[in-house]
Image: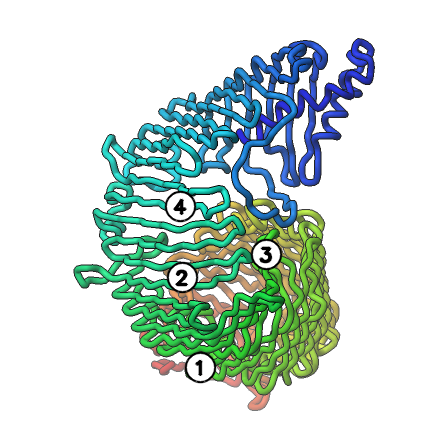
């Protein structure tokens, strides 16, 4: 209400002079064009935009306004609807502003406004009400509904508002009552009065809330207990006492008094506060032992008219905490005396759990002291010890901090100055393997010098912090900009780590090697503009990936220059160089308009993959347009290899939702990749592809084509299949249910055509295929003609179930069905069919066979002859033996296979006369 009521009044009264100048009735016709614009222009300011609609009745005793909104850079934060001013105009003639009612139907405060600094504030002064040329009397200030948005209190709240106020001849009084009307119990009332001539101050504050009220929710009060708080006091401000009390569940918890005392207006104002009580009911059970059932706070001191503060007593007492001290602070804010001692330890001697959020934190004991008194000299000293600090992610056996130096308040033209030296140690430091504490090692030491003069700059020099094989050294200054709550850091530090493996568990990478980083620049903390240069060197850097580690073996260098302003972050330079690789980049990072460019050069691709030979280069760019990113990649490698990609990455509030794009590539000389393939290959190839991927559900689709010329894979006769021009096309996708589908795959060469499709659900593929070989003759001499085959293959939990049929020249027929193990090392297959005996003539020339062989076999076991069983018979067979001038016709043969041997039964008529017969087993 400190903002809302004055804004309402200013809205109504700011318009009166301008409205009167415009002639009353004539101006009434132009309320919107003149009055509302006038209000908006005069009430708006830097960081505040006021919009007024529906203003009526400026010269009547009742003025109304339909709607008023106040916005800052983040949008509208205050909305007032259906406001009305009921006032007595004639009272102005006697120097009085009489307002019968200033009301609004609804006021909504969505959040706190963005703070806008008005610069340094003037020095404090004694309290007094303003002396105005007119008296002000407001009979009623009210709102039927005052809505406070969730960002203000962590929950939405709706209240009613009633109030009144009076200011006349340096005396004033005000009253306001807020009551919840959203189904919860809660009431806040405040009444106060003060008169300049008598100095009498009356203050009465009363807060009552039911269970799960605002205060209980914000403070985490156990059980959301009902709460009551009162603050009451009446008397001269130079001899004033106020009593306060806090109760929950109807039981008094904490109470005390605040007093002000001054004997003369020119004398210092003495103040005191004494609070005492049992806060255990206000605390979570884990924190009750720290405070105990008797907590006391005592503060006494005085403030001189020139602003000097003398805090004579500060005592805080709880079960596990004792803190006492005193201080004198000069008008300029520099201490003339400061003495503080404290101890944190349980009276039972057990470890103390600290009353802080997050992971449970325990301390065996802590002690601190600070001592400075300008009356004794300029020297100051501070000491702190901490024993048995423990929380899940860090344990410290003992930590000490010792600091001393000089402090001069200044005076007689000399500026104040502060300086000192700090030494700190931590021993028996530890934590889980992947914690920062474990990475720092068991012992940590540090030291640095402090200095500050009359300005706002605090200098940290000769910084030296580290463990057994790492150190952070350098100099840093902090410049405080009080009105902006900024801390500007500037300096240069060096981080040296001789063994990066100590940080491996923390980073989640198998870090190895040594590194040094030099960091220089400035930054506004926290999270403000910065300008920083980083240079560094490394030796045998590694991340546990052999291919990457080989690139950075030996000495490496790093250089980064980056800066951030209100518009965005600019990476002017990114250079990483090592014997095996170099990378460069630039970037501009801004909301919805970022740009990134990177280049990677490998002088010898063999470091990346054994068998490659020659340089490899890649360039990538990313350009942000709103929520989406345009991506591009261009890479080249051995054998004239080229690959390009252009695509789009689409993001939404939930993150990356889709990547789509097109890619093309070629390899002019496949022979350059022979060592990688572990065989001699040759020819050339090129491809094109397009597709998209949705990371939220794993869906993707890819389709493309590939072309080859004179492909040779070192497979001997089989390479005839890919001689000349070859082409392939494919369409592959994965649906939202996780099913992998090959909609189409085709391969065409002068000798071979192959088509396949399939799908895989739960990692169980099913493939259907058919193919045609133009001429079997080059592979089986004497058996020219086409060969066709088709079949299916289904992957099950025990392996592949296959079914294949084929037809070839000379009556060749094949039917295969059964199971092949997943590792393709064994099978259980039935093989039936017929084949011309002439298919073996190439292996027995000049001898020759004719006729057919019929087979009915089973392969059960490893893929070798010993696993075969069944029968092979001849039909119309004849053998020609030209070297001995005879032939065998007819030739009848039956071969039975079983248990690793073949049992032969062969008989034939000899052309020169007679008959031969061969019977018996042959081991396979």
Instruction: Quote the CA–CA distance across marks 2 and 4.
Output: 88 Å
Q: Which of marks 1 and 4 is in front?
A: 4
Query: Tag 4 or tag 1, which sits nearer the N-term?
Result: 4
User: Dot 3 surroundings within 10 Å: few (below 14), some, or many (20 or more)?
Assistant: some
Residue 725: which numbered mark, if any? none
Query: 466 above or below 171?
Result: below
Q: Nearer the viewer, mark 2 or mark 4?
A: 4
- Give the residue number, with chain letter if any, for mark 1: 915
Q: Is residue 701 visible?
A: yes
- Image coordinates for residue 63, horizontal then vertical, percent: 66, 13
Instruction: Quote the CA–CA distance across marks 1 and 4.
Output: 136 Å
- Image coordinates for residue 177, horizontal then vertical, percent: 44, 23
Q: In this view, does 421 lie to the left or right of 135?
A: left
- Image coordinates for residue 142, horizontal then vertical, percent: 52, 19
User: Dot 1 surroundings within 10 Å: few (below 14), some, or many (20 or more)?
Assistant: few
Instruction: Quote the CA–CA distance across marks 2 and 1.
Output: 49 Å
Identify the element where label 2 is drawn.
Answer: strand
Query: Tag 1 or tag 2, which sits nearer the N-term?
Result: 2
- Give the residue number, with chain letter if any, for mark 4: 271
Identify the element where label 1 is drawn.
Answer: strand
Instruction: Quote the CA–CA distance across marks 4 and 3.
Output: 32 Å
Instruction: Quote the CA–CA distance across marks 3 and 2.
Output: 67 Å
Q: Which of marks 1 and 3 is in front?
A: 3
Residue at the extreme bottom: 884
Identify the element where label 4 is drawn.
Answer: strand
């Amino acid at each position: 209400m400190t903002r809302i009521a004055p804004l309402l009044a200013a809205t109504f009264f700011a318009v009166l002079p301008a409205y009167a100048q415009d002639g009353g009735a004539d101006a009434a016709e132009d309320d919107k064009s003149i009055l509302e614009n006038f209000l908006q222009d005069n009430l708006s300011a830097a960081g505040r935009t006021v919009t007024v609609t529906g203003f009526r009745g400026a010269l009547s005793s009742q003025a109304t306004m339909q709607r008023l909104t106040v916005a800052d850079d983040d949008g509208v934060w205050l909305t007032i609807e259906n406001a009305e001013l009921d006032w007595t105009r004639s009272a102005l003639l006697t120097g009085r502003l009489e307002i019968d009612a200033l009301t609004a139907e609804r006021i909504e405060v969505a959040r706190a406004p963005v703070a806008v600094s008005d610069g340094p504030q003037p020095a404090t002064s004694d309290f007094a009400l303003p002396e105005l040329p007119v008296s002000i009397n407001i009979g009623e200030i009210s709102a039927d509904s005052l809505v406070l948005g969730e960002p203000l209190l962590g929950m939405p709240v709706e209240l009613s508002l009633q109030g009144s106020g009076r200011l006349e001849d340096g005396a004033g009084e005000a009253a306001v009552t807020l009551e919840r009307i959203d189904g919860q119990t809660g009431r806040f009332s405040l009444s106060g009065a003060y008169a300049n001539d008598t100095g009498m101050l009356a203050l009465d504050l009363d807060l009552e809330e039911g269970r799960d009220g605002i205060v209980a929710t914000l403070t985490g009060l156990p059980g959301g207990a009902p709460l009551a708080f009162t603050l009451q006091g009446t008397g001269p401000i130079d001899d004033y006492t106020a009593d306060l009390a806090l109760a929950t569940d109807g039981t008094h918890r904490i109470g005390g008094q605040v007093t002000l005392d001054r004997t003369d207006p020119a004398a210092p104002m003495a103040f005191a506060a004494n609070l005492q009580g049992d806060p255990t009911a206000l605390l979570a059970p884990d924190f009750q032992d720290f405070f105990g059932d008797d907590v006391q706070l005592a503060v006494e001191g005085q403030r001189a008219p020139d602003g000097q503060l003398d805090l004579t007593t500060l005592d805080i007492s709880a079960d596990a905490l004792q803190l006492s001290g005193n201080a004198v602070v000069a008008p300029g804010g520099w201490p003339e005396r400061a003495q503080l001692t404290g101890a944190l330890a349980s009276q039972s001697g057990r470890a103390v759990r600290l009353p802080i959020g997050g992971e449970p934190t325990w301390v065996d004991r802590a002690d601190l002291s600070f001592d400075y008194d300008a009356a004794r000299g300029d020297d100051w000293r501070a000491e702190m010890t901490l024993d048995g600090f423990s929380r899940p992610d860090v344990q410290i056996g003992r930590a000490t901090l010792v600091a001393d130096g000089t402090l001069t308040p200044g005076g007689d033209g000399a500026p104040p100055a502060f300086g000192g030296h700090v030494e700190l140690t931590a021993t028996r430091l530890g934590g889980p393997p992947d914690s920062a504490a474990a990475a720092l090692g068991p012992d940590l030491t540090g030291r640095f010098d402090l200095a500050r003069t009359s300005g706002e700059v605090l200098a940290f020099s000769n910084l030296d912090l580290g463990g057994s094989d790492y150190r952070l050294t350098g100099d840093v200054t902090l410049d405080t900009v009080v009105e902006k709550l900024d801390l500007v850091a500037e300096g240069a530090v060096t981080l040296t780590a001789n063994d990066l493996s100590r940080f491996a568990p923390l980073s989640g990478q198998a870090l190895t090697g040594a590194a040094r980083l030099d960091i220089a620049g400035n930054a506004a903390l926290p999270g403000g503009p910065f300008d920083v240069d980083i240079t560094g060197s490394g030796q045998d850097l590694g991340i546990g990936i052999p291919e990457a580690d080989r690139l950075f073996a030996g000495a490496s260098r790093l250089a980064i220059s980056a800066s951030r302003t209100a518009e965005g972050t600019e990476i002017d330079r990114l250079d990483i160089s090592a014997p095996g690789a170099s990378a460069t980049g630039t970037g501009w990072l801004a909301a919805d308009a970022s740009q990134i460019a990177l280049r990677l050069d490998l002088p010898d691709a063999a470091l990346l993959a054994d068998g490659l030979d020659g340089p490899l280069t890649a360039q990538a760019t990313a350009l942000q347009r709103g929520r989406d990113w345009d991506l591009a990649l261009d890479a080249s490698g051995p054998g004239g290899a080229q690959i390009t990609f252009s695509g789009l990455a689409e993001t939404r509030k939930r993150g990356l939702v889709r990547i789509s794009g097109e890619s093309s590539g070629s390899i002019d000389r496949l022979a350059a990749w022979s060592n990688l393939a572990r065989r001699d290959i040759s020819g050339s190839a090129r491809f094109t592809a397009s597709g998209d991927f949705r990371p939220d559900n794993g869906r993707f689709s890819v389709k493309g084509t590939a072309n080859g010329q004179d492909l040779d894979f070192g497979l001997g006769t089989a390479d005839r299949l890919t001689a000349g021009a070859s082409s392939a096309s494919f369409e592959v996708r994965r649906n939202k249910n996780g099913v992998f589908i090959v909609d189409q795959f085709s391969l065409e060469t002068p000798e071979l055509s192959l088509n396949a499709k399939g799908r895989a659900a739960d990692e169980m593929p099913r493939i259907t295929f058919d193919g045609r070989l133009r001429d079997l003759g080059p592979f089986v001499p004497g058996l020219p003609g086409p060969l066709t085959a088709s079949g299916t293959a289904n992957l099950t939990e025990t392996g592949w179930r296959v079914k294949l049929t084929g037809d070839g020249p000379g009556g060749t027929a094949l039917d295969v069905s059964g199971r092949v193990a997943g590792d393709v090392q064994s099978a259980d297959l039935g093989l039936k069919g017929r084949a011309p005996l002439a298919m073996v003539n190439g292996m027995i020339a000049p001898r020759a066979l004719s006729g057919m062989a019929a087979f009915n076999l089973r392969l059960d076991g490893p893929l070798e002859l010993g696993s075969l069983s069944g029968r092979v018979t001849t039909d119309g067979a004849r053998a020609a033996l030209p070297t001995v001038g005879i032939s065998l016709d007819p030739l009848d043969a039956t071969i039975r296979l079983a248990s690793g041997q073949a049992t032969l039964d062969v008989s034939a008529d000899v052309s020169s006369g007679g008959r031969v017969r061969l019977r018996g087993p042959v081991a396979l």
